[in-house]
Image: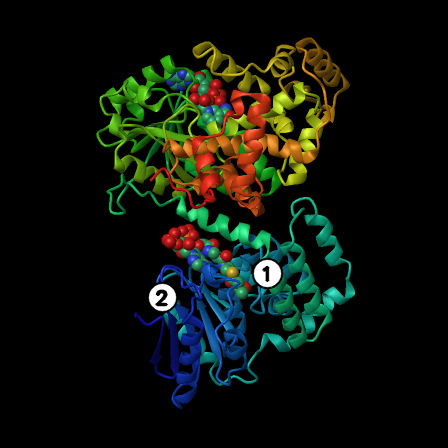
Amino acid sequence: MPELVRFSKKGAIGVITVDNPPVNALSPGVPEGILAGLEKGNADPEVKAMVLIGAGRGFIAGADIKHLGKPRPPGFKRTHDVIEANEKPVVAAIHGFALGGGLENALGCHYRVAVRSAKVGLPEVLIGVLPGGGGTQRLPRLIGPKAALEIIVTGRHVPAEEAKQLGILDEVVEDGELLERAIEFAERIADKRPIPRIRDMDEKLAEAKADPGMFDEMRRKIARRARNQIAPYQCIKCVEAAVSLPFDQGIQRERELFEEIVNGEEAKALRYAFFAEREAAKLPDIPKDTPVVDVKLAAVVGAGTMGGGIAMSFADFGYPVRILEKDKETLDKGMARIRANYETSVKRGSLDAEEMERRLARIEPVLEYSQIADADIVIEAVFEEMGVKKEVFATLDRTMKDGALIVSNTSALDIDEIAAATKRPGVVAGAHFFSPANVMKLLEIVKGAKSDKTTIATLSQLSKKIGKVGVVCGNCDGFLANRSRAPFNTEMNILVEEGALPEQIDKVMVDFGYPMGPFAVGDLAGLDIGYAGRKRRQKENPNAYRALPIADRIVEMGRYGQKTGKGWYRYEPGDRTPHPDPEVTALIRQMSAELGVPQREFTDEEILRRLLFSSVNEACKILEEGIAYRASDVDVMWLYGFGFPRYRGGLMYWADQIGVKEVYRQVEEWHREYGDRWKPAELLRRLAESGTSFREAQPGR
Ligand code: 3HC
Ligand code: NAI
C-alpha cells in the first residue's frame, strides 16, 4: 500500500504531505495519516511549526464522496478540530483545489498560503449535503456570515486572489513556489503567540447579529432556484447557528443537520449525478492510451446561430479559432452577433471588457477554405440539409491537412452518409452542441461506423478542455439526446389535443424542477425550427412520424415564439414572461373538436408520467440498440442538454426511483390504450421481469 500521507522535515518545519491521487480526497487512511503526521511533528523538539500540503494536482478536494454517509470507523477524530487545537502552528499550503473537507482542514490550520491559480470553496451543497467538517462555523467567523453564506449556499469555487481579499487566505504566492514560500511563512510565524484559532474569532459575527434579516433574505433569493431542495436551506440554518450558538454547540448543530440529509434522496441523486458525469468520460471500447490529436487551432464552417456559439466556446477556453462563411455579408453579421453576445455578458457583469476583447481577438473570420486548412479540428455548422453538408465535407476533405478531425454539428443527419462524402471517414464524427452553444454544457459526440478511436478519444478529451461534458453515443436519427427526447415532444402535443393546456403542462414540469416548461422553451428557441425539422422528416419518411397539427397551425399562423411576440403564449414587448393566450386556448379547443379527439382532464402526475415515461421507453430502445454505453449517459445528456433537475439524478435514475416494474406496467397500460407509440421496449420488459434497475442494465457493452 502506498503511503497516503508522508511526514518530512525542512529545518524547523515539519511537512505533512497528503498523497492520495488523483485529487487527494479524504479517503479512509488520509485523516488518520494527517493526525499521525501531526503527532510526529509534535513529538520532535526541533519542529517549531508545520505545513500541510497536497502532492500532485492539488491540496485536498474534500471528503471521499464514495464514502459519504457511511459510518465512521470507531475512534475517528475530526482532523480540523485536532489541527486547530495543536500547540505548534500549522500552515495550509494550497495549490489546485481546497474544496469541502479540504478547505475545512485548511480552516482548522492556523494560517493559509496559496498559489495564484488555486481555488477554494465549500461545494457540498452541489452534492446535496452541507460542509460538515466545521466549515459552516469557521468560515463565517473568518470572513463574516454574509460572505460565508454566499460561498456556502452557491458552492462556487473562489479564486485565490479573491479568497485573499475576503480574508480566507493569508498570503498568495506565485505558482511553482508553494512549498518554499509556505516553509518561509511557517518559519516567520513559528514563534508567534497567541496562535490564531478561528473558533475564537467572534468579532465578524456581530455583522449578522446587527442584521438578523440576512438569512431570510437569502432564503428568498434562492427560493426559485432551490425549490424542492433541502441542502441549501440546511446550509443557511448552519450559518445561522454559527451566529447564535457558541462554537462547540454550532459544530454539534452542523453535525445534526448534516446527518439529517447525507443519506436523503436529494444527496443520493446528486452523488449519482456527480459520478455519472465522470463515468461518461469512460469509453469501454477505446483504450485509455489511444493517441489523440493535439488541438491547437480550431475552425468552424458556418457563422450562424450555432457556428458562432461554437467558435465562442473555443475562444472562451483560450483556443484560436477561424470561422468561415460563404459570403462577406453573412460573415460580418455572424461576427457582429458574436460580439453582441459577449457584450451582453459584459453588461450583466459576468465578463470584463478586456477579457471580451481577448476572446474576440482569438476568433478570426475567413472566407476561403485554404485559410482553415491548417486547423487541427473543423466543426461544420451549416444548414441542416444533407446536400449542403456533403458538399462542405467534400470540400473539407480536399483542403484540410492530414490528421485534422472533420466533424459535424448536425442535430440528426446520418453521420455515415456525411462521412462517405470524404475519403477519410475515420476522422469524421458528430460533435453536437446544444443551443446556445457557448452556454449549454452538453457535447454529444456521435461515433460513426467508421470513426476511428483517435477521433472519438480526441473529442471526448477536447470537450472537457472547452468546458463541456462530452457524452459519446452511436449514430441514429436524432442520436441519443434528441431521439430520447422526441417522444416527450410528441406526447406534450398529444396531451394538448386531448384537453390539457400548455400552461398546465408547463406548470407541472416547472414544479417538477425544470427551469422552464417545455412550451415556454419552444417559444424561446423558436417554433419554426422544430416545424422545419418536422416537415423534413415527414417528407423523408412519411409514415414514421406522427403529425402534430396544432403545433403546425401555431407556426403557420406566424406565431414563432418570443421573436414574433406570440407562440404558445403571448409576450409583451421587451418582456420574456409568457402569458397564456385565450386565442391559443380557443384554437386548441377548436382544432381538437375538428380532429374529433375526446377531451378530458389530467392530473399532474399523469402529465409528468406521460412525458417522461415515453422518453424512458425510447431510451430503453436506444440502450438495447447499443447506441448508448449505459443508462447513466442518458441521464448526463438530460441534465446538461435539457435542464432536467439535477437533484432528481436524471431521467433514468428518476425512473429507477419509481421502479422498473411500475414503469413497465404503466407503459404496457398505455400501449393497450394508445397503440403502437407506447409499445414497450424489449429491454424494458426484460428488466421489469428480472427486476433489474436501469442503472444496472448495460446492454450496450
Ligand atoms: N471524492 C471521491 N472521488 C473524487 C472526488 C471526491 N471528493 N473528487 C474527485 N474525485 C474523483 C472523480 O470521480 C474522478 O475519478 P475518475 O478518474 O475515476 O473518474 C477523479 O477524482 C478526477 O476528478 P475530475 O475528473 O472531476 O477532475 P477535475 O480535475 O475535472 O476536477 C475537482 C477536480 C474540481 C476537484 C472535481 O473533481 C470536484 O469538484 N470534486 C468534488 C469536490 C467536492 O464536492 N468536494 C466536497 C466533498 S463533500 C465533503 O467534503 C464533505 C465534508 O464537508 C464533510
Ligand atoms: P443557421 O442557419 O443559423 O446557420 C447556418 C450558417 O451556415 C448560415 O450562416 C449560412 O450562411 C452558413 N452556410 C450555409 N452553407 C454554407 C457553406 N456552404 N459554407 C459556409 N457557410 C455556409 O443554422 P444553425 O441553427 O446555426 O444550425 C447549423 C447546424 O447546427 C445545423 O446542422 C443544425 O441542425 C445544427 N444545430 C442547430 C441547433 C439550433 O438550436 N439551432 C442545435 C444543435 C444543432
Q: Give the left or right position of residue 346, taking residue 500 as reference.
A: left
Residue 527, percent across and down? 59, 20
Q: Secondary structure at mark 1?
A: loop
Label 1 C-beta lies within 8 Å of the nearest ligand 1 atom: yes
Is residue 128 depicted above or below 488 in this figure?
below
Residue 406, percent across and down? 31, 28
Is residue 638 depicted above or below 166 in this figure?
above
Q: Nearer the viewer, residue 488 or 201?
A: 488
Q: CA distance from mark 2 to mark 1?
A: 26 Å
Q: Amino acid at mark 2?
A: Ala
Q: Secondary structure at mark 2?
A: loop
In the rendered image, which residue does mark 1 sit on?
Answer: 130
Q: Within 10 angstroms of label 1, few (less than 14), some, or many (20 or more) residues?
A: many
Picture quarter with the N terminus: bottom left
Picture quarter with the C terminus: top left
Q: Nearer the viewer, residue 587 or 528?
A: 587
Q: Quadrant of residue 19?
A: bottom left
Q: Is residue 267 visible?
A: yes
Q: Which mark, by number, is residue 400?
A: none
Q: Indicate how the structure is coloured in the image.
A: rainbow
Label 2 C-beta lies within 8 Å of the nearest ligand 1 atom: no
In the rendered image, which residue does mark 2 sit on?
Answer: 55
Q: Quadrant of residue 612?
A: top right
Q: Amino acid at mark 1?
A: Leu
Q: Is residue 331 visible?
A: no
Which residue is at 30% across, 40% downward? 457
Quadrant containing ligand 2? top left
Which residue is at 43% across, 76% downward? 32
